[in-house]
Every structure is written in C-alpha cells, then in structure tokens.
Image (cartoon, helix red, strand yellow):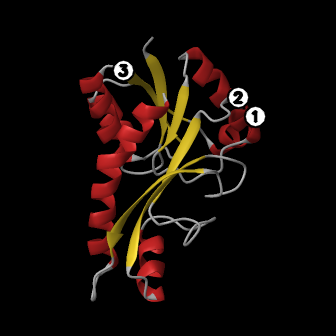
Amino acid sequence: MRRNIAVLASGSGTNAENIIRYFREKGSARVALVLTNRQNAFVLERAKRLGVPCVWFAKSDWESGELVLSTLREYDIDFVVLAGFLARVPDNILHAYPNKMINIHPSLLPKFGGKGMYGDRVHEAVIASGERESGITIHYTNEHYDEGGIICQQKCPVLPGDTPEELAQRIHRLEYEYYPKVIEGLV
C-alpha cells in the first residue's frame, strides 16, 4: 500500500522539494501534502510548481492544532516529516502520529539542539565551540525541541576556517542524501 506523507516546512523548502522528487521516483510513498506556518514561505511555491497541495495555517491554527489535524486526516496522511519547520507541533498532532513523525536537525544531537537552534545559528555555534565534526540527526518528534529518539546520525568534518555557509553546504548534502532514505525505511 502506498503511504501518504505530509511535509511541514517554514522556509525555502529545499529539503521538501528533494523529498517530493525522491518519492516520485520510488513510488513506495508520496508526498501528498505540504504544510507551512509562514504565509510567504518559498516552500509554498516549490510545492505548487511540483503539483503538491500546500496549505498555510495562521499561528492560532497551529497552536490549537485542530484545523491542522483535520487537514492531515482529510489527505489520509500516514506519516509526517518536518523539514525546516520552526514551530512547536501541538500535542494533539503529536499524539495522532506516535512514532510516525520525524524531524531533521543540522547537528549531532544532543549537541547544539533545542529551541532557537536552527540554520546558521547551529553552524555558528558548532564552529565557535571548536568542534571537529558536525552532521545531521534524524529523530522522532516529541513534546520537546530536538529531544525525540534518534533514528540516524551522519557526520561531516568541520574544517579549519569554515564559515557557517561552508559548513551548511556539507550539512545540506547529508540532508539531501540521507533524509529521504530514512523516511522510506520508516513509512
């Protein structure tokens, strides 16, 4: 049975696009819906261009979760993937998808995670701490930022003189390679 995936994203949507394209080729599942909490998020444009239904929800709708949950049910969503999603997922949605909701974080958790740690903030902190390696962590989503059970970690070096942008490029390559494969193994 082909599984339906929803992708939640707040930004440009490069990971969302990568996941959509990956499952179009594989056929084992499909991205049936993209949701965002930002009205001007470029992920909306990417989803539209790829013919995937996309919905923006206002802050109050995200916080209550009821309308979001009914939309997930309307699209028969089996699995939820966070890809650069910057809002806390309400408990009612978490409880509707136990062990069926995952997130990706641009560091080796538990280091450099938690509320407010995303994007270049993470890379800046990794570099400032003198770490010699960083990477990605794919984990289950729970009530706390970046504290769900770890599913997979992949590493890359932090090179002397790295800028956050240079480290981000290596991190993105890991995200694009591993995130869809891990999703495929879980759906």
Circle 3: residue type: Ser
Location of residue 70 (image quadrant): top right
Residue name at image x 24 percent, y 25 percent:
25
Is 183 in front, or is 152?
Answer: 152
Q: Mark 2–mark 1 contact, CB under 8 Å?
A: yes
Q: Mark 3–mark 2 contact, CB under 8 Å?
A: no
Is 143 in front, or is 8?
Answer: 143
Residue beneath disc 2: 96
Number of on-image labels: 3
Is 160 left, or right, of 79 in this rendering?
Answer: left
Q: Where does residue 157 sit, x and y in percent of width and height?
A: 31, 74
Neighbour class for label 1 at 10 Å: few (<14), some, many (≥20)?
Answer: few
Is 59 left, or right, of 1 in this rendering?
Answer: right
Q: Where does residue 95 sit, x and y in percent of width and height?
A: 74, 34
Q: Quick one: SS at disc 3?
A: loop
Neighbour class for label 3 at 10 Å: few (<14), some, many (≥20)?
Answer: some
Q: Quick one: SS at disc 2?
A: helix
Q: Where does residue 67 sit, x and y in percent of width and height?
A: 67, 27
Is 109 left, or right, of 13 in this rendering?
Answer: right
Q: Nearer the viewer, mark 3 or mark 2?
A: 3
Residue name at image x 36 percent, y 39 percent:
180
Cα distance between the residues tagged 3 and 2? 22 Å
Residue beneath disc 3: 28
- N-terminal of the two: label 1 or label 3? 3
Is 74 in front, or is 177?
Answer: 177
Q: Is residue 92 above or below residue 136?
A: above
Q: Where does residue 47 sit, x and y in percent of width and height?
A: 34, 33
For the question of whether residue 53 can be seen, the reply is no
Cα distance between the residues tagged 1 and 3? 28 Å
Circle 2: residue type: Ala
Residue beneath disc 1: 92
